[in-house]
Structure formats: C-alpha cells, structure tokens
Amino acid sequence: MFVLTLDQIGSRGDEDRVPALLERLRDKEMVRPFERTVGDEVQGVTADPTVVRKIVLGVLRDGHWHIGIGSGPAELGGSAREGSGTAFENAREAVERAKSATRFTPSVATIGPNQDTSADAEALLRLLGNLIESRTDAQWEAIDAHRAGETASQIAERLGISAEAVSQRRGLGGQALEEACWPLLDRLLIGTEQ
C-alpha cells in the first residue's frame, strides 16, 4: 500500500492551494481519496505504483508541495485521515525528510520497508523532478499537446511553428527520457514495499 502526504510549501505567505489540488486529484484511482488532514496538508492512499508516479510527477510540476511517499502495510480506516500502520508512518517521516531537501533538490522523499529500493526510487524521483522543474512553458506546451494525442504536424500548425521546432521543444524538455524512466520508477516503487 502507498500513502502520499503532500504539504504545501510556504503556505503561511501564500494562498491556500489545497482546494485546487484536491479538485485535480479527485479522479485518481485511490483506495482512500485525497483529503485535507491538517492545515495545508493532504493525504491519500493507493495500491497502484503507476498512480503514485502520475500524481507525484504532476505535483512536482506545480512546485508548491513537499511530497512524502510511504509504503508498507496499512490498516485502512473509513478515510485517509483514519488509517494507520507502517505506510502511514513512513509517509509522515518521508514528508518531513522532503522538507529538508536543499533549495536545488525537488522536495520529495520515499520511505518503505526496503530501504535500498526506497532510496533508489527517491533518487530517480528527484532526478525526474529536476528535469520537470527545468522545462520552459514552450517545452511544456509541446509535451502536453503530444501527450494529449496531437501529432507534431498538428502541434506545429496550431502554434505557428515548424514540426522541427516542436520536436526540438520536446527533445530539449526531455520528454522521451522522462517517459523511458516511467517503467523503472514503477518497478522501484513496487520494490519499496518488499
């Protein structure tokens, strides 16, 4: 089981971003859907490492959240807030560790029963986070359109640029590199539980 704890960065000097995040995450396949736990923090539970990956990479894109991923046994209550067990404890420890990340390191941490695999998953998440956080708006525009099913020609025509420029934006944005890492990340997340 995976527990994700997301804590808003700098919430005292910023708007409350929890309602918008909960709205964005409400359609994810969760065992216990995300809900506000305390203040500017949300928590959700899933059994699917692919869901964990999609959520974490999307939240890293925002740049407004400390992300803690805990794996292991969990006793599920009626809601994410009511659960207990190792996965919940690990998520709490992970989000606290994420808060201590340096200014140039994405604020994400992973803790599970398998410490070596958890460290590997965390390292890959931070590497992908650096890639994601470095993308320009133009790169995101091309990547998002491609992931939505548009061809390079369609994107180029809509944006008024060449197909080569679309490919360059996607290439410099590291889209293929990121997506090539997804299966490895999923396997590492599964391995954190063992």
Image (cartoon, grey):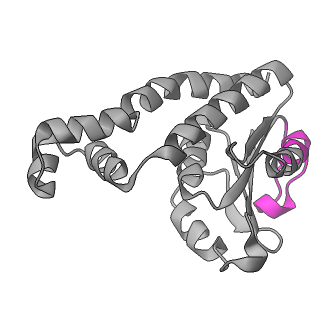
Residue 20, compared with residue 48, is above or below; it is below
> Between 120 and 114, which is closer to the camera in this rendering?
120
Residue 177, compared with residue 159, is above or below; it is above
- Judge left or right: residue 100 versus residue 158: right
Where residue 139 sits in the image (x, y, percent)? Answer: 34, 47
Determine the residue positioned at 51% across, 29% down. Answer: 182
> Between 101 and 43, which is closer to the camera in this rendering?
101
Where residue 126 sits in the image (x, y, percent)? Answer: 65, 36
- Judge left or right: residue 122 versus residue 63: right
Where residue 181 sits in the image (x, y, percent)? Answer: 51, 25
Q: Confirm whether the magenta stretch covers residue 182.
A: no
Where residue 41 sits in the image (x, y, percent)? Answer: 77, 66
Determine the residue positioned at 33% across, 44% down. Answer: 143
Q: Confirm whether the magenta stretch covers residue 85.
A: yes
Determine the residue positioned at 85% across, 36% down. Answer: 73
Is residue 97 among the parts visible in the rendering?
yes
To which quarter of the image does residue 108 belong? top right
Determine the residue positioned at 59% across, 41% down. Answer: 129
Residue 144, compared with residue 127, is above or below; it is below
Q: Which residues are magenta?
A: 73-91
Is residue 29 among the parts visible in the rendering?
no
To which quarter of the image does residue 167 belong? top left
> Between 139 and 152, which is closer to the camera in this rendering?
139
